[in-house]
Image: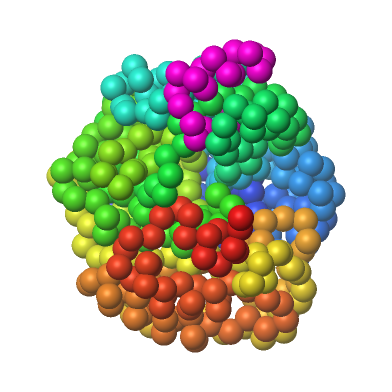
Amino acid sequence: MEGDKLNKIKRILIANRGEIAVRAIRSITELGGESIAIYSEGDKESLHKDLADFSICVGGANSKESYLNIPSILSAVEVSLADAVYPGYGFLAENPTFAALCERSNITFIGPSSKTLEIVGDKAKAREAAIRANVPVIPGSPPVNDIKEALEYARKIGYPLLIKAAAGGGGRGMRIVKNEKELIKLLPIAEREAEGNFGDPTVYLEKYIENPKHIEIQILADKYGNVIHLGERECSLQRRHQKVLEEAPSVFLDEDTRKAMGESAIRFAKEVNFIGAGTVEFIVDEKKNFYFIEMNGRIQVEHPITEVITGVDIVSWQIKIADGQPLTLKQEDIKQRFHAIEFRINAEDPENFIPNVGKIEKLYLPGGYGVRVDTHIYQGYTVPAYYDSLLAKIIVFGNSREEAIRRGKRALKELKIEGLKTLKDFHLKILSDKDFLNGSYTTNLIDEKYLKQN
């Protein structure tokens, strides 16, 4: 079928590992391309290495020696004669330097331009772009240079506040401040954390919205100015600012708010000249006022729930857009046909979320109608200690939220992973939580109810 195969791109190197590398290999194969996997010395038993058409070891088990090793990865591109790089999520997916080096080498980076990544990867610059695009933003400050300046902005904004790393993400380098005394104490700590995590000590202040919803909008944009959104994902179930479970659509939004958020996301994407698949993230208060947080210029872990409710293959569209193909989808074509839930099955203790590793002695993955599993694990696989704890994503969908929840319980009960602890039992607990069932849950639910943080 026209548009379901690659035209210019033929060989794609996947600069990632785990389930997203497996996901990319499947789309590349279906589009008629050749896939090249990179792997570290710690990933010699990895599934993505074996599924790809070709594979190249790029360094040691430590990510800095392999999946973050730009010279080694670019050498792999050259040796393999790849003409494109698929970055996935994490590692170098949003690294503007890596994207720029690909551009200079005439290698297609499957994602936005390095210039766009520089904007969306800097929270302060992204906030300025949102203001230009008439997208609501949380009251806040520009980057602060010292404590005196921070105190002046804090008095204007009002407490409680968040200190946020300008180059941050994933909740790292973020501190809640309730008064001036805490600001004086925590500002230098936040700056050191920002420097340690992102190599940039720059921080700024933002009004802290208590008990918010975290809702994001999936975007697709081609090289010809066509931009659409695929609806929202509810991502409020988080522990320590890290997502655990996502669902789509959100039961909290009304149609007017949903429409306004989608239109705002499109305006922002156009303002930063975004190309590819990206996500515009918002927090929403109890009165349904929404505020821009950031844009992720990459595929999201939770993209499958949008795929199953809309019927749109987001990863394949990422690749086709990079191949120079125009979007054939129109906004009016996008319908949310089902309700979907994604469970992140992490190798973590369900009581305290501490990661653990080990050999998978026994594995049974759920199936049946309305169940999808994205994973890179198999029976006998030893989970390495060097990387993210995500083992699998169990995605369920139904004609209603209630049906999806029932199917989720069934699928989780079918799941068997023996040899290490996972979040399976925690997800089953959440599916019986009254705040989850009535849809009133916020980003604070897990931390306050299950982690008992003070």
* Relative horizontal placement of residue 408, taking residue 312 as reference (left or right): right
Q: Which residue is painted at 77% across and 56% down in the image?
A: 386
- Residue 218 placement: quadrant: top left
| In the image, residue 234 above or below residue 267 | below
The reply to whether residue 23 is in sight is: no
| In the image, residue 307 above or below residue 226 | below
- Asked whether residue 166 is drawn in magenta, I would say yes
- Asked whether residue 163 is drawn in magenta, I would say yes
Q: Which residue is painted at 16% across and 43% down in the image?
A: 256
| In the image, residue 138 above or below residue 252 | above
**Segment colored magenta:** 145-167
Q: Which residue is painted at 70% across and 50% down in the image?
A: 38
Give how far across and how far down residue 116 sits, in percent.
48, 24
Q: Which residue is painted at 61% across and 58% down in the image?
A: 453
Check the image and tell me how it is coloured: rainbow
* Relative horizontal placement of residue 350, taking residue 372 as reference (left or right): right
Q: Nearer the viewer, residue 366 or 82?
A: 366
Q: Nearer the viewer, residue 51 or 407?
A: 407
Give how far across and how far down residue 194 sits, in percent.
69, 31
Give how far across and how far down residue 19 sits, in percent.
58, 60
